[in-house]
Image (spheres, rainbow, N blue to C red):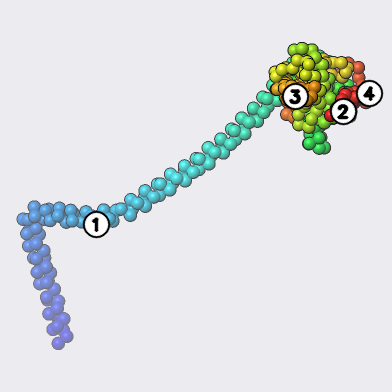
């Protein structure tokens, strides 16, 4: 019985194949005869599936766009960082170059002043504010080994800065003319009237200029040279305003200092006409009236 069934099953296989192939052939002939209809159907299906295809492609496009955008952003950030670093480097170089040019110009002016009118002066560099930055004193890099003495006047290219009050072999202490104990004999350049300029902390003052003398805004006060300490003709202060005060025989004047008292990098030290061993111009003028 099993052999009969097996024989029947094997015998039917060629028939089944024939039927399938016949159906496929007929289908192919039908499709071949209706090619235009099939193409039309494909067109309809393509149109109908277009939104689905768009939706399927969009995530890929968004991913590619996002990747490109992020890469561009990272490149821009990196480029911006490089440009900022380069800009800071160039700015620092420019500031350094500007500072060096200013120092060189200042040194040239000091040397020009030395060569032009005050050939016996000694150029020096300010190296410190001293022990107390608020004490109106500076330290320079030249001392007694360079021929400097206490009492020598110190100027920059614009005018008087102060005088040396302590001298060491390789350095010296400079007391600014704004120091509270500073007194400088001056004369009004325009009229020749003599007076005294006093240090007043951060500025200078003209305390006892009589109202019967001529004093105007814009007048330049220069060293008189009468104390044998400061050479004559060095600018000390400029009169910004001058008013006759009621009830007092003196002008009320406001002065400005033309010299860069606190910012000069290079200075010129001028020897005294008659060197003072320990006495300074401030002490020499101690007998001057004070309020």
**Residue at 92% over, 22% down:** 276
Q: Quote the CA–CA distance across marks 2 and 1.
A: 96 Å
Please tell me how crowded label 3 is: few (under 14), some (14-19), or many (20+) other residues with Cα within 10 Å: few
Of circles 2 and 3, the one toward us is 3
Q: Is mark 1 on a helix, strand or loop?
A: helix
Of circles 1 and 3, the one toward us is 3
Q: Quote the CA–CA distance across marks 1 and 3.
A: 98 Å
Q: Quote the CA–CA distance across marks 2 and 3.
A: 35 Å
Q: Is mark 3 on a helix, strand or loop?
A: loop
Of circles 4 and 3, the one toward us is 3
Is residue 165 rendered to the left or right of residue 45?
right
Pick whichever of labels 2 and 3 is earlier in the sequence.
2
Of circles 2 and 1, the one toward us is 2
Pick whichever of labels 2 and 1 is earlier in the sequence.
1
Residue at numbered disc 4: 277
Residue closer to the observer: 199 or 151: 199
Residue at numbered disc 1: 52
Of circles 1 and 4, the one toward us is 4
Q: Is residue 260 above or below residue 46?
A: above
Is residue 218 rendered to the left or right of residue 13?
right
Pick whichever of labels 1 and 3 is earlier in the sequence.
1
Residue 61 picture location, percent across and down: 33, 50
Q: In this view, does 244 lie above or below 87?
A: above
Residue at numbered disc 3: 245
Pick whichever of labels 2 and 4 is earlier in the sequence.
2
């Amino acid at each position: 019985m099993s052999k009969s069934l097996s024989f029947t099953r094997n015998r039917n296989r060629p028939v089944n194949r024939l039927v399938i192939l016949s159906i496929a052939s007929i289908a192919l002939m039908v499709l071949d005869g209706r090619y235009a209809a099939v193409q039309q159907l494909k067109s309809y299906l393509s149109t109908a599936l277009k939104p689905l295809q768009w939706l399927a492609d969009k995530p890929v496009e968004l991913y590619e766009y996002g990747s490109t955008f992020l890469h561009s952003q990272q490149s821009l950030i990196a480029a911006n960082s490089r440009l900022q670093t380069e800009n800071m480097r160039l700015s620092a170089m420019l500031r350094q170059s500007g500072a060096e040019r200013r120092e060189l110009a200042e040194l040239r002016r000091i040397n020009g002043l030395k060569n032009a009118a005050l050939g016996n002066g000694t150029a020096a560099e300010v190296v410190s504010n001293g022990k107390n930055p608020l004490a109106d004193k500076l330290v320079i890099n030249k001392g007694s080994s360079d021929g400097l003495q206490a009492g020598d006047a110190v100027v920059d290219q614009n005018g008087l800065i102060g005088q040396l009050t302590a001298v060491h072999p390789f350095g010296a202490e400079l007391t600014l003319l704004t120091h509270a104990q500073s007194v400088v004999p001056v004369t009004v350049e325009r009229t020749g009237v003599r007076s005294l300029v006093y240090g007043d902390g951060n500025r200078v003052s003209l305390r006892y200029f009589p109202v019967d003398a001529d004093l105007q805004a814009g007048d330049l006060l220069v060293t008189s040279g009468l104390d044998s300490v400061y050479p004559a003709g060095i600018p000390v202060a400029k009169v910004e305003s001058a008013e006759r005060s009621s009830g007092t025989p003196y002008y009320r004047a406001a002065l400005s200092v033309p010299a860069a008292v606190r910012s000069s990098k290079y200075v010129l030290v001028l020897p005294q006409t008659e060197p003072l061993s320990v006495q300074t111009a401030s002490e020499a003028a101690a007998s001057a009236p004070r309020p």
